[in-house]
Image: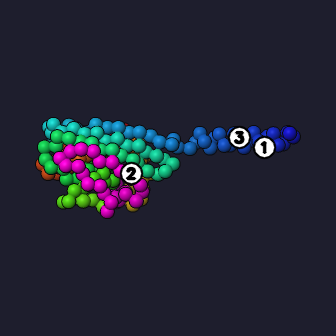
C-alpha cells in the first residue's frame, strides 16, 4: 500500500468512527411513577401509575406503556405535557382518550377504571402549543424537553380535570 492510500484509508476509518461517536444513541428508556403529590396543585389521591417511554432516535419514535389504578374519579384522558416540575404546560402528546375526550384521530382508548395502554408516538402525533413555541411535527423538541426534565405525563379524571396523577419525566 502506498503512503497516500494508507493515509486515505486511515482518514476514512477515523471519519467513520467520529461520525458513529457523534450519532445519537439507538434508544433510551425513561420510567416515571405517577402520583397525586406530583400534580399542580397537589392532591391526595391514592391512585398510582407508571409511564415508561422508549425513545428511538434512529426511528424518530417514542414507544410508551402507561399503567394506572385506583383513580378516585373516572379516567378522562392522559397526555405528555411540556413544563418544568411544579408548573402546568400544554398537551403535546396524547397517550389515551375517552368518549368524552377522544383526542386526535388514532388516539387509543384509556382503560377504565384502570389498566395499561401502549402505543407508538411519531412526529404526526405532536399537538402544537404555539405559546410554548412547539409546532406541529416537532417530536425532536419534545424529546429534548424530556431529556432536560422539562416534560411530564399525567392522567386526568372526572374529579381532577387538571390531572389526578402526574410524574416528571427525566
Classify 10 Å Cα crowding around label 2: few (below 14), some (14-19), many (20 and above).
some
Q: Between residue 149 and residue 100, name the one nearer to us.
A: 100
**Where does residue 143 sit, x and y in percent of width and height?**
41, 47
Q: Which residue is mark 2?
A: 120
* Label disc, if present, on residue 51 of the rendered structure: none
Tell me which corner region of the image, top left, top right, bottom left or bottom right, holds residue 43. Answer: top left
Report the front residue among 2 and 132: 2
Which residue is label 3 attached to? 13
Mark earlier in primary sequence (1, 3): 1
Tag 1 secondary structure: helix
Query: From the viewer's perspective, is 161 left or right of 2?
Result: left
Q: Which residue lies at the image location 25% right of the left edge and 39% below the top edge?
A: 49
Residue at horizontal 48 percent and vertical 47 percent from the top? 57
Residue denoted by label 1: 8
Whole-angstrom CA distance, mark 3 to mark 2, is: 36 Å
In this view, the residue in front, 88 or 114, is 114
Residue 90 visible in the picture: no
Residue 92: percent from left, percent from top: 33, 54
Highlighted magenta segment, given as a residue range = 105-133
SS class of the residue under badge 2?
Answer: strand
Q: Residue at x 74, y 41 (%)?
A: 11
Amino acid at each position: 500500500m502506498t503512503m497516500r492510500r494508507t493515509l486515505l484509508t486511515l482518514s476514512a476509518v477515523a471519519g467513520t468512527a467520529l461520525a458513529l461517536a457523534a450519532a445519537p444513541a439507538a434508544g433510551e428508556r425513561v420510567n416515571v411513577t405517577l402520583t397525586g403529590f406530583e400534580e399542580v396543585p397537589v392532591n391526595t389521591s391514592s391512585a398510582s401509575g407508571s409511564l415508561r417511554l422508549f425513545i428511538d432516535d434512529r426511528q424518530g419514535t417514542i414507544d410508551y406503556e402507561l399503567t394506572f389504578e385506583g383513580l378516585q374519579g373516572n379516567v378522562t384522558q392522559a397526555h405528555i405535557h411540556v413544563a418544568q416540575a411544579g408548573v402546568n404546560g400544554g398537551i403535546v402528546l396524547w397517550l389515551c382518550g375517552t368518549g368524552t375526550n377522544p383526542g386526535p384521530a388514532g388516539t387509543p382508548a384509556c382503560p377504565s377504571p384502570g389498566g395499561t395502554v401502549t402505543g407508538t408516538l411519531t412526529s404526526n402525533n405532536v399537538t402544537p402549543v404555539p405559546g410554548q413555541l412547539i409546532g406541529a411535527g416537532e417530536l425532536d423538541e419534545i424529546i429534548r424537553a424530556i431529556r432536560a426534565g422539562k416534560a411530564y405525563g399525567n392522567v386526568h379524571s372526572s374529579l381532577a380535570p387538571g390531572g389526578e396523577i402526574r410524574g416528571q419525566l427525566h
